[in-house]
Amino acid sequence: NAGVTQTPKFQVLKTGQSMTLQCAQDMNHEYMSWYRQDPGMGLRLIHYSVGAGITDQGEVPNGYNVSRSTTEDFPLRLLSAAPSQTSVYFCASSSPGSPHTEAFFGQGTRLTVV
Amino acid sequence: ELKVEQNPLFLSMQEGKNYTIYCNYSTTSDRLYWYRQDPGKSLESLFVLLSNGAVKQEGRLMASLDTKARLSTLHITAAVHDLSATYFCAVDMPAGGTSYGKLTFGQGTILTVHP
């Protein structure tokens, strides 16, 4: 039972480079979201999706793009990496109407921008 | 805008002692979560609190929710070293609203349990 799978686990980028963080879930969850975790700030929502073809911005969306063409996948694109995007990124999925409703998180991607 | 605040942010405890972590949030909500995170790891769901007065217990941890006070507590009983981790509370949505899986997190409480 894979749950939420993120790749890569670690990545080093140079300023100005672009890349895509991958996220896939096998639980048929409608809701998926991306968070970044920085020391002392908890996790902050970047973008979220309530279903295939539907995405919206969260609290800190600048510099990131998302799309959701399938229920399973929700990639996060960094358009032009900046040192301020050095962080740990978590993808999460959840299902509306479930008795427990809690979000399930991937293992995270540790990104360093130099 | 929903804000979630935890305190304390750092907690150093001796084994065997009791302590409480507090989670305050700014907008009425009837859904609150507690997560645990070990260093370098993902978030593990501990408790889901879905209504006013909800109380859940698992081992040495007990969580409660008071929606009127906009307060949740995570109580640690007779702490052991294995409980050392970072604990987050997160709020899902305004009361009576629709959940879109959008969580607002507290800053996290770094708990260290010493022998």
Image (tube, coloured by chain):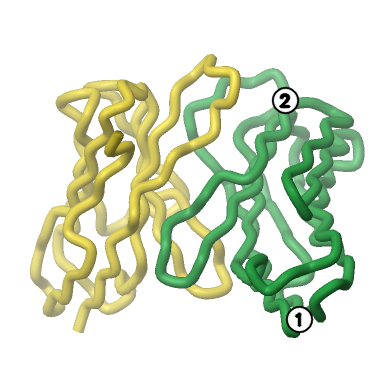
Chain colours: A yellow, B green
Q: Residues within 10 Å of mark 1 (few under 14, many from 20)?
A: few
**Residue B12: mark:** 1
| Residue placed furthest toward the top | A97
In the displayed structure, does residue A60 sit left or right of residue A20? right
Q: Is residue B79 above or below residue A66?
A: below
Query: Chain for mark 1?
Result: B
- Badge 2 density bin: few <14, some 14–19, many ≥20, Cα 10 Å: some
Q: Position of residue B5 (x, y in %)?
A: 72, 59
Q: Name above or below for residue B89 compared with residue A109.
A: above
Please state which of residues B36 and B15 is positioned toward the viewer in this rendering.
B15
Query: Which residue is at 73% across, 61% downward?
Result: B6
Q: Is residue B20 above or below residue B49?
A: below
Residue tagged by mark 2?
B95
Mark 1 falls on what kind of element?
strand
Q: Amino acid at mark 1?
A: Ser
Is residue B1 in sight in this rendering? no
Q: Secondary structure at mark 2?
A: loop
Q: Position of residue B101 (x, y in %)?
A: 48, 32
Q: Measure the C-alpha gap from mark 2 to mark 1.
A: 34 Å
Amino acid type of the residue that numbered disc 2 sits on in the rendered structure: Ala
Going 78% across and 37% down the picture, which residue do you hit? B56
Question: Residue A63 appears at what percent x and percent y?
Answer: 26, 58
Kindly identify the residue that appears in the image at 68 percent across and 30 percent down: B94
Res. A59 visible in picture: yes
